[in-house]
Amino acid sequence: MKGSNFSSKRELIYSTLCSTKTHPSAKWVYEQLKEDYPDLSLGTVYRNIALFKENGKAVAVANILGEERLDGDTSAHAHLVCKTCGKIQDIPMPSITQKGDAQDFNTDFVSVTYFGTCKDCTSH
Amino acid sequence: MKGSNFSSKRELIYSTLCSTKTHPSAKWVYEQLKEDYPDLSLGTVYRNIALFKENGKAVAVANILGEERLDGDTSAHAHLVCKTCGKIQDIPMPSITQKGDAQDFNTDFVSVTYFGTCKDCTSH
DNA sequence: AATAAAATCAGGAATTATTACTGATTTGAG
DNA sequence: CTCAAATCAGTAATAATTCCTGATTTTATT
């Protein structure tokens, strides 16, 4: 079954994704690792991240400045996204009312994101 | 000033974006228009949609199946996104608690999105 | 209406994020 | 140890999006 085998590269990619609060892009993960693991391929990073998303081990936060930004922390929390510098911060998940009835929709994941401008980009 | 001039193409693109509840991609908008306006360019659609986003006249809902999906309705509402077929539905905006204090963050827009599987994709 | 400057456009090239393919390597089960 | 399945590197291919240039349209001003 896909994604069930052990894979040292997969563990590397996952731990790197989870090692930061910056909500990185796939390319960032690749760049962090390629120094120490020069035989790592960008394609492998993309493929494994796709697996993580399928298996609910990672989520896409937003597409910022053309790059999909990821979060290996799938616990309930919301995000602040600065449109100017692209910085993404975690904040506690606000409590939200139920989305009415079932709506004939099977929800896997709720995303709450505040788009705006961070302090640094406001003051400068 | 950019985006302030009248432009017949811009109006076309905007009205097409607002004419549907399907939350289309830029390419979809282009394809709707190119029949009747064969001298419309895809680049023009992208450029104008970028202006709409800058000016708060449109928002990106999510990147689904590799395409950025848009909404010309910027009134407060939430979305149901089917990961399987890519369909996006509007639902009323749930009431959410404040995001704590100001957090030193100037919020322009709050996005609430439920990712999951729609009825059609669940039953089949 | 005529004109000039600014804004916008088409068309296509260029960029870039992401995916697909292939043959080699690694892993897991017997 | 051996074989099949999973995974990988490397690279080619794809596709979304942006950039560039010269032409057209719009706006402001006569």
Image: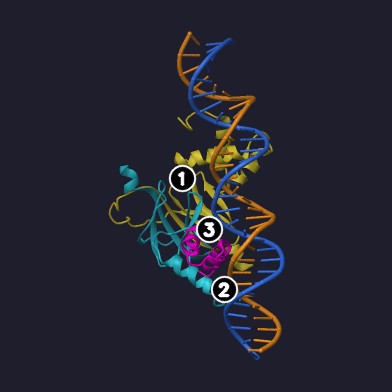
Chain colours: A cyan, B yellow, C blue, D orange
- Mark 3 surroundings within 10 Å by alpha-carbon count, few (fewer than 14), some (14 through 19), many (20 or more): many
Give the residue pinned by disc 3.
B81
Quick check: A67 above or below B124?
Answer: above
Discs 2 and 3 carry the same chain letter: no
Give the residue pinned by disc 2.
A3
**Residue D23 falls in image quadrant:** top right
Of A12 and A60, the residue lying toward us = A12
Query: Do we see residue A43 in this rendering?
Result: yes
**In percent of the image, x 61 and y 68: which residue is there?**
B123
Mark 1 is on which residue type?
A: Thr
Mark 2 is on which residue type?
A: Gly
Q: Position of residue A122 (x, y in %)?
A: 33, 44
Quick check: B98 above or below B46?
Answer: below
Q: Chain of mark 3?
A: B
| Circles 1 and 2: CB atoms closer than 8 Å | no
Of C16 and A81, the residue lying toward us = C16
The quarter of the image holding the N terminus of chain A is bottom right
Residue B34: in magenta span: no
| Circles 1 and 3: CB atoms closer than 8 Å | no
Q: Secondary structure at mark 1?
A: loop
Give the Cα distance between marks 1 and 3: 17 Å
Quick check: B113 above or below A48?
Answer: above
Which one is closest to the eye, mark 1 or mark 2?
2
Quick check: B9 above or below B101?
Answer: above
Q: Position of residue A109 (x, y in %)?
A: 47, 64
Mark 3 is on which residue type?
A: Val
Q: Main secondary structure of the magenta part?
A: helix
**In percent of the image, x 50 and y 49: which residue is there?**
B60
Q: Which residues are magenta?
A: A27-56
